Amino acid sequence: MDFKRSIQDCCKRERISQEMFCQRLGCTMSELRYAGNWSRIAHGAWVAFGAKLEGYEPRSAREERAWAEQLLPWIRRFPVKALQKRGLLPHGTCGAGSVRDVLRFMGVGGREGFDKTYTFTLDSVAPQVYAAWIRIGETLASADAAKSKSTFAVDKDLLARNLKTLTRNSGGGLRSAIAKALRDSGIGYIEVDPFIAAPYPTCASFWIGDAPFIQASTSRINDSVLLESICRTAWHIAAHPRRRSSFLVAPCNAPASPTQNTQDAEAQKFAGDLLLPEADECRLICCGRFEEDRCIRYFSRTLRVRPGILVERLQQQGKLPHRTLLNDFKVAV
């Protein structure tokens, strides 16, 4: 077996493309095609996947120690203790062992692989923490993805219809309804406890092979914010099915900023129109009595929209203060 064939076997076993293989190892496709620094690639594959590629030779203890010491300050920013409590990392390891354990759990070969794979977290307040939270979802989703043999096909209309059912004035069980609506649209749904109190990840999207997944936090959050997070994250999957990952941190419903990229602005517009179309929003505002609870109840029945969505939208438009008795309409889920 040659080196390139062993890479292909590794990709097949891990259910990743060669492009993703390169991302997770922090190398380039040209290094695979033209026999670049194969020793570095082989070491990264062993660290990330436990795969010994053709021609792999273990580094000396001195080289391994020097490599680990360079990465150790960065590794300590991961929620190591929290991952150990969950049984995802072994207890008691230190030095090179702890570096290898964390990188193996994250499925990356080093710092470069992390930066390429979890680029979307790098501008956040805690990239290692958020990426570890998403990685837990990826490991949970792998079993579901392995059972799925179908190729994901984008059907925006079906997705929009299924998500629209979530906005109606219904009772409890919103999270189970979200899971059903997404799965009926061909998108998996995972829930994972957050590591930190606030700000915490609300939603994330990622791909396992051809299967897209949305991951949500189990933290208590009001229904309108959760729904907007889900809709915005689903839009990224449906509108740009190129297996790009993304995530949102609460509060996710802030007005678009001048620096917001086009995709995020479009996702926010999609979610806003889906939760409460502009025409319905105008009807609500023109009522002139929206600060009264009877008005919220009336439009909730008339428009078939959860009352918390109406209150949240009025607050976004500056028509209601953020501290109001009408916040009682927001349901914590």
Image (cartoon, rainbow, N blue to C red):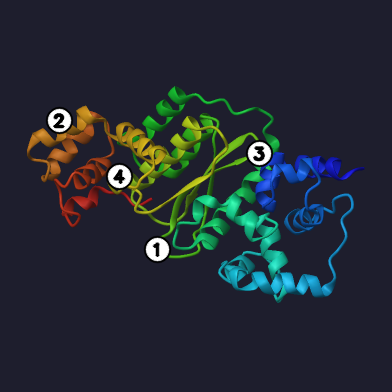
Q: Which residue is at the front of the view, 68 or 140?
A: 68
Q: Earlier in the sequence, mark 3 or mark 1?
A: 3
Density class for disc 4 (Cα within 10 Å; few <14, some 14-19, many ≥20) is few
Q: Which residue is at the front of the view, 121 or 229?
A: 121
Q: Earlier in the sequence, mark 3 or mark 4?
A: 3
Q: Residue at x 75, y 53 (%)?
A: 49
The answer to whether mark 1 and mark 2 are in CB contact below 8 A is no
Position of 7 with respect to 256 (left or right) is: right
What type is the residue that disc 2 sits on?
Arg
Residue that numbered label 3 is attached to: 145
What type is the residue that disc 4 sits on?
Ala
Query: What x and y, as percent, mark residue 288?
Result: 7, 38
Q: Earlier in the sequence, mark 4 or mark 1?
A: 1
Check residue 256 in the rendering and tell me which mark sits there, or answer none: 4
What type is the residue that disc 1 sits on?
Ala
Position of 180 with respect to 93 (left or right) is: left
Check residue 198 in the rendering and tell me which mark sits there, or answer none: 1
The answer to whether mark 2 and mark 4 are in CB contact below 8 A is no
Q: Residue at x 61, y 65 (%)?
A: 83
Residue that numbered label 2 is attached to: 283
The answer to whether mark 3 and mark 1 are in CB contact below 8 A is no
Mark 2 or 4, which is nearer the eye? 4
The answer to whether mark 4 and mark 1 are in CB contact below 8 A is no
Residue 173 visible: no
